[in-house]
Amino acid sequence: MLRVRDVLWMSLVPRSFMASSINCDLFIDGQWQAASGPLLPEIVDSYTGEPFAKFKSASAADVDRAVGAAVVAFPQWSTSPLTDRVSCVRKIADGLRNRSAEIAAIISIEVGMPAKLSKRIQADAPVAAWSTYADIAESFEWEQRLGHSVVVQVPVGVVGCITPWNYPLHQITGKIAPALLAGCTVVLKPSELAPISGDSCRGY
């Protein structure tokens, strides 16, 4: 069975919060790879106004590799049992729940939300959403008879997810979780203004 991290092909990940570091990896085809695109504007600590991380963007060639890897993974993932896909999504929810305090702190720095609100809105709410999507998938009517016809819901292929900065993990959740449950593979492009939260779903 494929692990979720094998179908979440690309995430921008800073290896250090130090402003002097320009160390950013992409997760493609099950491996971390250095980004080969241009240097992005520095990520600024919303509390201090000081730069605290630097990134390189994915290049067009990086994106092509990510999409190619997701295409290769699609036949196996799309035909995996729904129970397996639901199990993977619940595993992500559990992993995020265990790191919710860390995630809230990171997103507070990225987007400038007070810590208490960030924990409830930016961390706990996405965790609940991953679990809710799994619940919905289990009860969803994937095949429905309408008169003399049968309507079958099938995965469409590779889904490209481009997310904004304001509720970064929630926006990622709202795109990735349903796509994975439907049997699609995913290429994620998190916001360049709040990219660190894009790393939250890796490794589960």
Image (cartoon, rainbow, N blue to C red):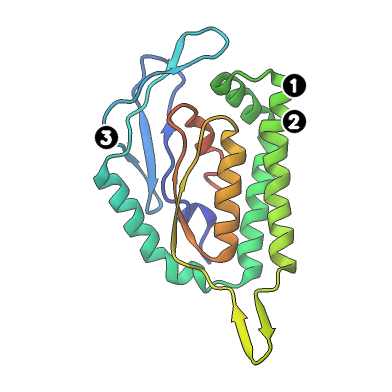
Q: Is residue 108 above or below residue 147?
A: above
Can you tell which quarter of the image residue 133 is in?
Answer: bottom right
Real-space Cα separation, disc 3 to disc 2, in angstroms: 35 Å
Residue 125 in percent (x, y) is at 72, 39
Question: Which x, y percent locates residue 140?
Answer: 71, 68
**Amino acid found under the numbered disc labelled 1:** Lys
Could you say which is closer to the camera, residue 25 or residue 118? 118
Q: Is residue 136 left or right of residue 43?
A: right
* Position of residue 24 in the picture relative to residue 145 (left or right): left
Rendered image: mark on residue 157: none
Q: Residue at x 66, y 68 (%)?
A: 83
> Residue at the spot x=50%, y=40% of the render?
163
Residue 1 location in percent, x, y? 53, 67
Residue behind mark 2: 120
Q: Quadrant of residue 15?
A: top left
Report helix, strand or loop for mark 3.
Answer: loop
Marks 2/1 in contact by CB < 8 Å: the verdict is yes
**Which residue is denoted by mark 3 in the rendering?**
37
In the image, 198: left or right of 81? left
* Left or right for 43, reference 48: left
Going by the numbered disc 3, the residue's amino acid type is Gly
Q: Amino acid at mark 2?
A: Arg
- Labels 3 and 1 touching (C-beta < 8 A): no
Q: Secondary structure at mark 2?
A: helix
User: Which of the numbered marks, if any, corresponds to residue 116?
Assistant: 1
Identified at 72% across, 51% down, the residue is: 131
Give the residue displayed 67% in from the left and 49% down from the top: 130
Q: Is residue 51 above or below residue 125?
A: above
